Amino acid sequence: MSVAIVGGGIIGLAIAWRLVQRGVDVTVLDDGETGAWHVAAGMLHPGGESAFEGPALGVLMNRSAGLWPDFAAGLGVDVGYDGTGTLGLALTADDVAERARWWARQKLPVLRPSELREREPALSPRIRAGVHAPGERQVDPRRVVAALRDRLAGRIVAKRVESLDEVQAGTVVVAAGCGTARLTGLPIRPVKGQVLRLRGEPGLLRHVLDATVDGREVYLVPRADGEIVVGATQEERTDATVTAGGVLDLLRAAVDLVPQLAEHELAETTVGHRPGTPDNAPLLGRLDDRVVVAAGHHRNGVLLAPVTAELIAGLVADGVADPLLAEFAPGRFR
Ligand code: GLY
């Protein structure tokens, strides 16, 4: 069996890796552009990234979170998989009201500011309340993609695919993020996210911080080497401009949460486009006899990479359609 995967991002590479492990002859066609994974902070946040996720997506996210430990270990190198957990935070009384329902849904006890500062001493004394989500993890998506690329050496071909007709393979898996819309006509829209990388002495923060700050959502993801990823705007826009307003909002929220960050280096400003679908859930499964789709992961591409790889590899290599796939059928909006 020959399989071509269109898209060399974290989803396409993860599928390719699982297919190779099943003995399938795989080629990944990669247009050389860095995808959303390059910008992503790598929060593994099965509790949900928004209030709008349906139950099936919750099941998919939890299943993938459970696969991440083996997935990360199987890559054989340090990919920054870390289990310190997340602190959910609210700065003002209005922010607490905003977060309260979400925290209740996660069944997490609300912690006082002193308890939060015991866990994370650099937090601002202005923070009103928060929760500790011990089951949440993080990983460095750039390291994951580098490790996957190593595993797939010799199978990745530099090529921008203009039409699926030009791809020579019995089965084509389209895992091209936002580019999937151009190749298949499926409804995937780019959702712009601006993300910053700050750099300072390691050890300032231990947990991922996920906060509402004066009505704005922000997250801070600390890496062991002192990098802190600050994200993200969410804009229904296609441009790739880093804007003054976007950077200002992210930095203001970050420094309101952790005042010492004002002394950090602003090392990187980036823009990515999340592949969003009409219901913000991915498109997973067969489009026709030859074409399989794995795209539209919106805010959850890194979290969902292992489960997507298992489901799509099972479908393509073993002909097994896991019942969960029915919820994410690529043709559901027709
Ligand atoms: N997963 C975080 C984001 O999309 O901003």
Image: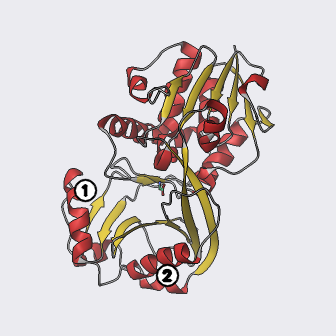
- The residue lying at 42 percent from left, 20 percent from top is 322
Residue reaching furthest to the front: 334
Secondary structure state at the residue bearing disc 2:
helix
- Count neighbours of disc 1 (C-alpha within 10 A) and say few if under 14, some if 14 to 19, many if 20 or more: some
Choose top left, top right, bottom left or bottom right for residue 66.
Answer: top left
**Residue 282 rendering spot, x and y as whole percentages:** 47, 37
Q: Quadrant of residue 179?
A: top right
Q: Residue under label 1, please give it.
A: 102
The mark tally for this picture is 2
Q: Mark 2 vs mark 1: give the one in front.
A: 1
Q: Earlier in the sequence, mark 2 or mark 1?
A: 1
Numbered disc 1: secondary structure:
helix
Q: Position of residue 232 (x, y in %)?
A: 49, 64
Q: Is residue 122 visible?
A: no
The dot on residue 3 is none
Three-letter code for the amino acid on which mark 2 is drawn: Leu
Question: Does residue 256 sit above or below 44 in this rendering?
Answer: below
Q: Which residue is mark 2?
A: 261
